[in-house]
Amino acid sequence: MKLLRNILDNLKPDFEKGGKFPWLHSTFDAFETFAFVPKTTTKNGAHFRDALDMKRTMTMVIIALIPALLFGTYNIGYQHFLSLDPKIGFFDEIWNNLWYGILKVLPIIIVSYVVGLSIEFGFAQWRGHEVNEGFLVTGMLIPLVMPPDVPLWQVAMATAFSVVIGKEVFGGTGMNFLNPALLARAFLFFAFPSSMSGDNVWIAEKADAFSGATPLAEMMAGANIPTHSFMEMLLGVMPGSIGETSAIAILLGAILLLFTGIGSWRIMLSVFVGGAVMGLTFNLFGSNPYTQLPFYYHYVMGGFMFGAVFMATDPVTASQTNRGKWIYGFLIGVMAVLIRVVNPAYPEGMMLSILLLNVFAPLIDYYVVDSNIKKRIKRWKMKGGENV
Amino acid sequence: MSNIITVKKGFDIKIIGEAENEILTPKVESYAIKPQDYIGLIPKMMVKEGDRVKAGSPIFYAKHNEKILFTSAVSGVVQSIKRGEKRVIEEVIIIPEQTQGYEDFGKESLASMNREDVLEKLLKSGLWTLIRKRPYAIIPNPDSSPKCIIVSGFDSSPLAANYNILLRGKAAEIQLGVDVLKKLTKGNIHVNVSFDKTTCDELLKLEGVEINKFKGQHPVGNISVQIAKLDPINKGESIWYIDAQDLAIIGKLFATGRVEKDRTIALVGNEVKNPQYYSVKLGASIANIVEKNVNKENNIRYISGTVLTGKTISYDGYLGAYDNLVSVITEGDYYEFLGWVLPGFKKFSLYRTFLSGFLNLLPKQKRKPINIDTNLHGGKRALVLTGEYEKVLPLDIYPMQLIKACIIGDIDLMEQLGIYEVDAEDFALCEVIDVSKTDIQQIIRDGLELMRKELGE
């Protein structure tokens, strides 16, 4: 440790103003602060601070994503071999499944991080800022919402689009209003629809004879109930995006997020409530099989669970007020089920529903805060204050 | 009459180094008045270096109102007038003499005085400056009148001094001080005490006041939190407030005709060998107090005031105008290898990402005092997490929105979001727990100052 510290201390002047590589200052700083928490002390105000910083906060989210990532990786392998031999059991080819999955997933993760981080580092340097940790999470979320067969150049394009247009043009992490990972997915969805929908993309290199339809697509096509059982969908043994198939793995992550207090329990809970309310409403009035689907099926199909736990809770793009979070989450749940069941064009409603509510989150906050302002003005008027 | 008022949100941070019972009287070799302790003050000097002054002699007056005088706490010689950048006066240093001489302000009985007489006496003696007003936490304009006056009888900050000890034996002076305040306002005099900590008769047996017992965790001792519960400030209104110990100084003036700015202070913090109380006068140098009682071999920070809101001073610096605490804590200028990944058994955090964060779920009586240092624990970032400030701010205010309104300097929005109801100190806990390491108190202070400059008092 001391050796590393000495090396960094020796290198440091080269990256500062007047050194050899001042244009790499942010990059150096990012690596230095990765290795060592800096020795900066408080100047104004409170003389001591909480030990939690942005790096650790973001790390917690990444840790929470690990179960979904691991399961997803394994499931890709399993789904592939299943399409070749429909009799194969889930645990029959453990190492083959895992190895096949890693070969599929790792390149996507690498492309996402390399493209995204290069842009982040570049912008941080350009602005003279420290590199923000936000992309550490986004860079992991993007692969997890991709179909396993997505071409790598598309991942690169989507990542670049979401980081530049979705985030950096607004000023970087904390200033964006759309969830960058979902924006990447939406970009591919609308730019390359053939790579992002249909039956062919959800299982890597599947055999032609095998159906490979996701439960959402089956329901869309008018099935009475998905061919996969509720239990299979809960566990995640079905085709789908890399990280979103297993509700159980996602719930493990949710437990960590709630346990550490990093994820908002208000948003998660209200998304599920919203989904249930809309699902039950359809049950009451609906006429086709999709509307008659029990509401809890929506939780385990497609990206509902993943969206509720990891996407809707992004603090930057969600409502910022506590009351706003209830409304925001509830509407996400409602819209997701509504789009799924009613809209013929898009099988997956979760992505669009979250992006839609991202757009409306500031408006929700505006009205929540406005009620506080009105209360204050009313109190003042009761005291005889003039009109403002 | 006493009311019990419960404040639900907030958090008591327990830190190693709380003061013990004992009160010592150190020999203080110099005193200073620091104009920068008074928000928005531009001083106009009335003495030169080398002048002799008595206790109560004016040293400077406020540029915006020449009736507001600032007086010496001791008799002696003005040794130096220290100036900083742009010739701003930082300290007026006075060396005390052996036998103290006092200006005589008369012993007229309070009963025969009217509001103008009382005001004049307070202004001339310089004790007017002990009173502050909200909004803005500044010295009030003597021509104005508040809707009520609050006597602050406890402090809920970490390591705060115990008012039962600070006020010991000052019952008569405080009562007389209350009677003086009653001449200044037609509104109520509130004496705010702690439900579980305040046991002293000096406050509980005061007459002619409304005693409010506050229950809860920090910032329950903050004036803003108390006003919000008693009588929220609306636009155009003001309230005055004074510390109970300073009220005793006013009481003493009316009893004896002398300015005796006695203040009991506590020396606290994890770098203090024997945390205890000292009886000094306002503006005392801390040099002799800390000399043998701190771990000088360590790299340490001296703070006049609390660890949440105080100002950094040097080891031979001076006590701030409104402070009754000198906190000494470890400087945190160290690198920590992979500090952000470690499980963190001993780190201070209100979040449960560190194992130590779980200790904070214990009820406050069972929490153990912790060690702190001044390390920022991370780099500054844009505001990302939401919903955290609300947990430690017991006010009907949207903190994130107000902070952002202050950053962009939108005074209409600041007003609508309740800037008049807060002071920078209320955001100290928000600042402590802020993951983005933002200097929130400075942002709020700048916002308040912008309001004051744009709209006047």
Image: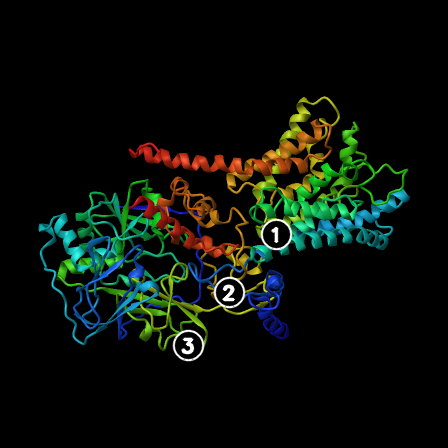
Give the chain letter at badge 3.
Answer: B
Residue A355 locus on image (x, y percent): 63, 38
Query: Which one is in front in this view, the residue at disc 3 or the one at disc 1?
Result: 1
Residue B355 percent across, percent down from the top left? 58, 60
Residue B72: horizontal and vertical position, in percent? 21, 65
Residue B155, located in which quarter of the rendered image?
bottom left
Which numbered dot is residue B296? 3
Q: Position of residue A32 (x, y in %)?
A: 61, 65
Q: Amino acid at mark 3?
A: Lys
Host chain of mark 2:
A
- Co-location on one chain, circles 1 and 2: yes
Horizontal side of residue B227 vs B349, given as left or right: left
Q: How many marks?
A: 3
Q: According to the image, label 1 marks what residue?
A: A134
Q: Nearer the viewer, residue A69 or A135?
A: A135
Q: CA distance from mark 2 to mark 3?
A: 21 Å
How are the colours assigned in the image?
Answer: rainbow
Q: Which mark is drawn over residue A40?
A: 2
Does B376 sit above or below residue B409? below
Element on which disc 2 rests: loop
**Helix, strand or loop status at disc 3:** loop
The kind of residue on which mark 2 rests is: Thr
The chain containing the residue under callout 1 comes to: A
When asked about the image quadrant of residue A354, the answer is: top right
Task: Inspect the image, locate mark 1, and give the three-letter code of the amino acid beneath it.
Answer: Gly
Disc 1/disc 2 C-alpha distance (Å): 21 Å
Instruction: Note whether residue A132 is visible.
Output: no
Q: Residue at x 70, y 54 (%)?
A: A113
The Cα atoms of the two marked residues, 3 and 1, are separated by 41 Å
